Image (cartoon, helix red, strand yellow):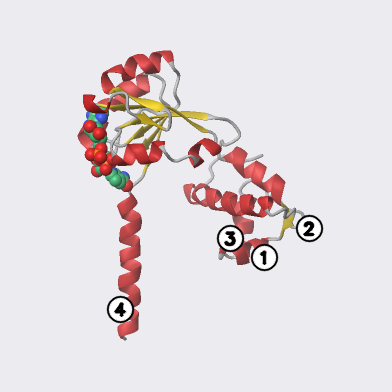
Amino acid sequence: MQNKGISQAVIGRLPRYLRYLGDLRENGVERVSSQELSALMRVTASQIRQDFNNFGGFGQQGYGYNVDYLYTEISKILGLDHEHSFIIIGAGNLGRALGNYLNFERRGFIFKGIFDMNPELEGIEVRGVKIRRIEELEGFLKENPVEIAVLTIPKTGAVGLVDMLVSNGIRGIWNFAHVDLDVPKGVQVENVHLSDSLMKLSYNISRYNGSKKK
Ligand code: NAI
């Protein structure tokens, strides 16, 4: 399968396809046309065909898409056909909420550890995983290879941790700290800013109100 140089916009749409295909699969649907998927997902059929063409297309003329096959292929493209271990740094409100979210595990993201600088949190369990002190982090990584670090700490702390994380094998950072991180080539960072989405909502509300006033 050819999937080099695919735009991040397409990659960003794949999880949504996967969710819908997962629902279809659970409901016993075996095949779906781009028109049907288009009606379900409220995107154009041509967008769907274009997106899937990036990977050589998955469908057959007149048949549509085999749901199970498509689900499996998109899972593979997203790297969900194997497990990813992760740790959380910062066991505050956000860190604990993420640690408690079971669906990550169902997708193959395995919660290995959670660390915090606040000694009072040590030993408290988050979904069966004890909070450890941040001082233990480097030793932990040396003994337990981990792929992903989730940063749910303020930006100042995040910047100072990156080098240590990378030199101890971390390959991906899911960054909730409000700062852009400098990482070496080969290390991936995915920034999440929930407020961006909220501001988009605010924009859309304002725009709608604006158009109603006319
Ligand atoms: P919180 O105050 O409940 O938790 C932060 C935790 O991080 C505390 O337990 C603290 O002891 C620990 N901590 C701070 N610096 C540390 C360090 N260098 N090493 C280890 N532990 C450290 O805050 P909350 O609500 O959980 O938010 C965490 C961070 O994430 C905040 O900086 C906040 O700005 C950011 N945030 C980002 C969001 C986003 O969408 N990107 C959404 C919500 C929060």
**Which image quarter holds the N terminus?**
top right
Q: Residue at x 71, y 47 (%)?
A: 68
Pinpoint residue 56: horizontal percent, then vertical percent. Answer: 67, 47
Q: Which mark is residue 63?
A: 2
- What count of labels does the image hold? 4
Q: Is residue 86 visible?
A: yes
Type of amino acid at the residue the image marks with label 1: Gln
174 relative to 28 in the view: left or right: left
CA–CA distance in space, label 1 to label 3: 11 Å
Residue most extreme to the left: 156
Can you tell which of label 3 and label 2 is closer to the viewer?
2
Report helix, strand or loop for mark 2.
Answer: loop
Q: Which mark is residue 35?
A: 1
Pinpoint residue 41: horizontal percent, then vertical percent. Answer: 57, 62
Q: Around disc 1, counting alpha carbons within 10 Å, would you say few (fewer than 14), some (14 to 19), or many (20 or more)?
A: some
Write down the residue under mark 4.
210
Tell me whether circle 1 and circle 4 mark residues in contact (CB < 8 Å).
no
Q: Around disc 4, counting alpha carbons within 10 Å, would you say few (fewer than 14), some (14 to 19), or many (20 or more)?
A: few
Tell me whether circle 1 and circle 2 mark residues in contact (CB < 8 Å).
no
The disc, 4 or 3, on the residue closer to the chain's N-terminal end is: 3
Pinpoint residue 95: horizontal percent, then vertical percent. Answer: 33, 37
The disc, 1 or 4, on the residue closer to the chain's N-terminal end is: 1
The disc, 1 or 3, on the residue closer to the chain's N-terminal end is: 1
Q: Around disc 3, counting alpha carbons within 10 Å, would you say few (fewer than 14), some (14 to 19), or many (20 or more)?
A: few
